[in-house]
Each structure stands twice: as C-alpha cells, then as structure tokens.
Image (cartoon, rainbow, N blue to C red):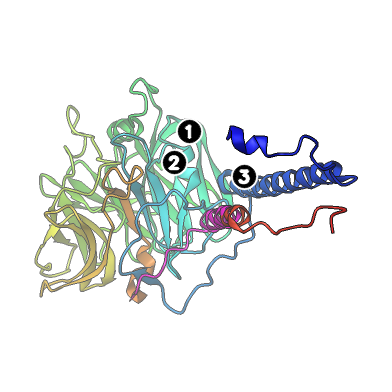
C-alpha cells in the first residue's frame, strides 16, 4: 500500500468547478426522496390502522340483500381478530348467533352473527360492552335483544342487524334480567327480572343469571310499544317457549310447564319429568301438539333450597337427548332424539335442527327426522387451533339459530368469509407495506448509473 501511494502525484488535478456542490445537492436530494417515501408509507399505514381499530367509525358497507331463501354455510369460518362489528358495518339478517373463542390465556371470546344471505361475519359489539349477557336472536334473524351481565340494568338493548342501530327499551327500576323466549311473529319477548341483592363480588363471573333464576318474576315485553307487563303468578320462571300462534306460551316453574296467554291468564299446565326442562325458546312444536324437553344442563330449577344454575355461558359439551311431551289431545309423541347437545329449532313438525358434538369435540348442526331418526349434517364448526393467536382450540357457547328461517333453509357451500371493512383495511395495510418494502429494495438493488462529472469531457 505504501508503494502504491508513493506513485500518486504530489499535486492531484483540481476538481472541476462546482463539482463538490453538485455532489452535495444530489446526495441531499436522494436522502430527501427516501425520507418522503418512507413518511408517505407510514402515513398511509397509520391512517388505515386508525380506521381498522377505531370502534366508532362508520364505513359505507352495504348490508347483504335478502335472498330468495335463507342459507346456512356448510362450514362456519374459523376465528379472526379482523371481524368488523355490527355498528361499523351491518351485514343484514343473520342465520346464527353464538359466542366463539377461548379464554385459556387471554379473554378473546367474540359474540358473532353469521349472515343468512352470504358468508358475512360480524361481532355484536353491544354484547361485548355488556359482558356477553344472555341474548336472543329474532326469529327472522334481523335483530338481537340483550340484557346485561355486569349487574342490574335499567334497559334492554335491541340491535338492528340490518342498520346497526340500537334501541334502548326502559325497564323502570334497575333489575337483573334473564331473556327466555321470542315469539314467532317477532312482537313479544318473555323474560325474567328481579332486584339484585349483590353486585360483582365475584368479579367477572356472571352472578345475574343464577340470582334471577332463583327469585325472578315473569315479564312479557311488547316490542312494538316497549312496554313490559309483569305476571306475578309465574315465579320464578326457568325456561319458556311461545306457541306457533304467538298468542300463548309455556313457562316452566319447578317441574311444571304452565300455559298462559299474553295477558298472563293461566289455562293449563303440563308436568315435566324430574331432571328435565322445557327446551329454551324453541320447545313448542310448530304444529302446536308437543313440548320438547331436555335433561337439566346443570342442577335444574330452584326448588327453594337448591338449583338455579342456568348454565349460561357454558360451552357446548354435554350430550343429552330430546323427549316430547304431548299436549291435550295430541296423541302419541315422537320417539326421543338421542345424542344431542342442544335443540335449536324445527324445520317442519316432523324434523328438528340440533347441535351435536363428536368424541373429538367437533360441533355440528344436524337435521333429524322424527320417528325415523335419520340424520343429515347441515354444517360444521371450526374448533381447530385458531384461537388465542393460534395457541388454543376454539370453544362454542350460547348458540342460537333464527328459528323462523329454518323451514325455508338451504345449505350453501361456504365461501371466503366476508368480515367487513376491518378485513379489507388489513389487506390494504399489508399490500401497502409489501409494495413499499419492494420499492425500497428495488431502489437499493438497482445498478447505479454512471454519470459524467460536471465539467469533465
């Protein structure tokens, strides 16, 4: 190296006029361009993420238009944190409402509705805000009614799934609430209400349901007026189901299904076998002849000293059967339906839709023909390890179907789930980041052009 430097002239040739200034200008211009490009990419990403996570942002997403017949996907989509909310992007009428997720390490449960007219999935954010309380899906799939599991409440919330709007229905004094059944015509809801004597000493554990189940009184809500009528003689109601004409209902108190009209007048009762209960919300057959009963999920109705654990919030896991109790003059009831987790509704007077679970813990929706006992699987739930960031399997709880849509139900091939603007924005963010990174790599990797120095021929 010393010999090499010794060959250099003592006085190197002078740089052309303005050469150093030109080099500095080019260098600064290159740095400026890189900074501006990076800042633009960051600004776009921040803007898109703000839209993605902002819960109150209303985005112009058109709800799915009702199809000729409601549909059920043959496979429910897995868990995703990118599912938009009903308030952000209403998706139209729903075929199913359920709670999905896992809380093993993180509380990542989602109350979801699935579209009846397409593969749309939305989170019911109003349920999240009220600690995922007992809720009912309207028979036509257009609304969700919910109470409040945080404690006593002064209102019920009615969520319109087609518009995202919420309606507050006052209850008068603050009470604990259990929702029991929704009439087939969509006008009336039966619920149980009671003042709460304790509030939150169990932290996040639900104490509303069991206390109201022990001391509650039946109320009938007219959704057209928002007015509730108390039925003092029905206390404490355990489960309930409306008749197909929507003008009568059966309410279980103890081990009796008491039959009343909308004015609260009692006109009969039906014994319910020990250890069994009237199937919640959908326990009256569409031809009006039978009541469906299932074994207690937990310890049954409150009998004055024990009972009252409703099982609200429990995962679908306990295999039971469905038996049918004839009403007066109904004749011989159908044979029991075995190996059922939950009765979800009726396709016809001769067929029911149930939830089942196999030995591996996979849940399915199945249509069962009464009498013959033949079964047809309608849909499966994804219970794979997609929950808690892929660390846990997914659990299913508080499942409801839009019972009024089941007679015309079709099963469709599940397409790519449409989760709303959060999913679209996430894809846009990923696209911008990938394109930005590719552009920067291209700029770095491209060969430098040889430029003549200023003033040099």
Camera-side residue: 417 or 443? Answer: 443
Residue 270 among those drawn in magenta: no
Residue 287 in view (yes/no): no
- Could you give the CA–CA distance between mark 2 and mark 1, rounded to whole angstroms? 8 Å
| SS label for mark 2 | loop
User: Residue at position x 40%, y 46% from top?
Assistant: 110
Q: Of discs 3 and 1, which sits in the foreground?
A: 3
Q: Of discs 2 and 3, which sits in the foreground?
A: 3
Q: Quadrant of the C terminus?
A: bottom right
Mark sitting earlier along the chain (2/1): 2
Camera-side residue: 98 or 77? Answer: 77
Could you tell whether 334 is left or right of 116 in the image? left
Q: Residue 453 placed where, x, y %?
A: 81, 53
Q: What residue would you read off at disc 3?
A: 50
Report the magenta stretch's main SS: helix
**What residue span does the magenta drawing correspond to?**
411-437
Q: Quadrant of the N terminus?
A: top right
Q: Residue 112 placed where, x, y %?
A: 41, 52
Camera-side residue: 202 or 3? Answer: 3
| SS label for mark 1 | strand
Residue 434 among those drawn in magenta: yes
Q: Residue 104 placed where, x, y %?
A: 28, 36
The numbered dot on residue 147 is 2
The answer to whether marks 2 and 1 mark residues whose Cβ atoms lie closer than 8 Å is yes
Mark sitting earlier along the chain (2/3): 3
Residue 9 in view (yes/no): yes
Q: What residue would you read off at disc 1?
A: 153
User: Residue at position x 35%, y 35% from top?
Assistant: 106
The answer to whether marks 3 and 1 mark residues whose Cβ atoms lie closer than 8 Å is no
User: Residue at position x 85%, y 52% from top?
Assistant: 454
């Amino acid at each position: 190296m010393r010999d090499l430097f010794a060959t250099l002239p003592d006085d190197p040739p002078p740089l052309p006029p303005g050469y150093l200034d030109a080099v500095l200008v080019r260098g600064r211009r290159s740095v400026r361009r890189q900074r501006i490009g990076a800042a633009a990419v960051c600004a776009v990403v921040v803007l898109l993420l703000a839209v993605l996570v902002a819960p109150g942002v209303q985005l112009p997403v058109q709800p799915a238009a009702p199809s000729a017949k409601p549909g059920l996907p043959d496979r429910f989509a897995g868990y995703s944190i990118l599912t938009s909310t009903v308030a952000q992007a209403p998706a139209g009428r729903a075929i199913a409402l359920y709670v999905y997720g896992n809380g093993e390490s993180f509380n990542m449960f989602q109350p979801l509705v699935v579209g009846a007219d397409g593969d749309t999935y939305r989170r019911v954010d109003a349920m999240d805000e009220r600690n995922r309380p007992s809720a009912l899906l309207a028979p036509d799939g257009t609304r969700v009614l919910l109470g409040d599991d945080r404690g006593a409440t002064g209102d019920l919330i009615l969520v319109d799934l087609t518009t995202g709007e919420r309606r507050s229905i006052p209850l008068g004094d603050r009470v604990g609430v259990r929702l029991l059944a929704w009439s087939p015509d969509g006008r009336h809801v039966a619920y149980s209400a009671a003042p709460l004597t304790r509030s939150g000493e169990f932290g996040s554990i639900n104490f509303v349901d069991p206390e109201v189940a022990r001391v509650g009184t039946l109320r009938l809500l007219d959704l057209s007026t928002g007015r509730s009528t108390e039925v003092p003689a029905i206390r404490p109601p355990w489960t309930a189901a409306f008749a197909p004409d929507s003008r009568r209902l059966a309410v279980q108190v103890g081990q009796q299904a008491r039959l009343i009209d909308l004015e609260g007048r009692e006109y009969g009762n039906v014994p319910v076998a020990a250890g069994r209960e009237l199937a919640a919300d959908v326990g009256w057959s569409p031809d009006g002849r039978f009541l469906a009963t299932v074994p207690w999920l937990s310890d049954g109705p409150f009998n004055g000293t024990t009972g009252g654990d409703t099982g609200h919030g429990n995962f679908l896991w306990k295999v039971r059967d469905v038996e049918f109790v004839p009403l007066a003059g109904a004749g011989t009831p159908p044979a029991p339906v075995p190996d059922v987790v939950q009765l979800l509704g009726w396709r016809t007077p001769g067929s029911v839709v149930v939830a089942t679970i196999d030995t591996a813990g996979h849940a399915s929706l199945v249509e069962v023909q009464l009498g013959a006992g033949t079964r047809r699987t309608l849909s499966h739930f994804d219970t794979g390890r997609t929950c808690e960031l892929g660390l846990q399997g997914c659990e299913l709880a508080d499942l409801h179907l839009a019972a009024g849509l089941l007679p015309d139900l079709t099963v469709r091939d599940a397409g790519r789930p449409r989760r709303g603007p959060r999913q679209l924005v996430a894809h846009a963010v990923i696209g911008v980041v990938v394109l930005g990174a590719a552009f920067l790599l291209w700029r770095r990797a491209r060969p430098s052009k040889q430029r003549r120095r200023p003033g040099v021929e």
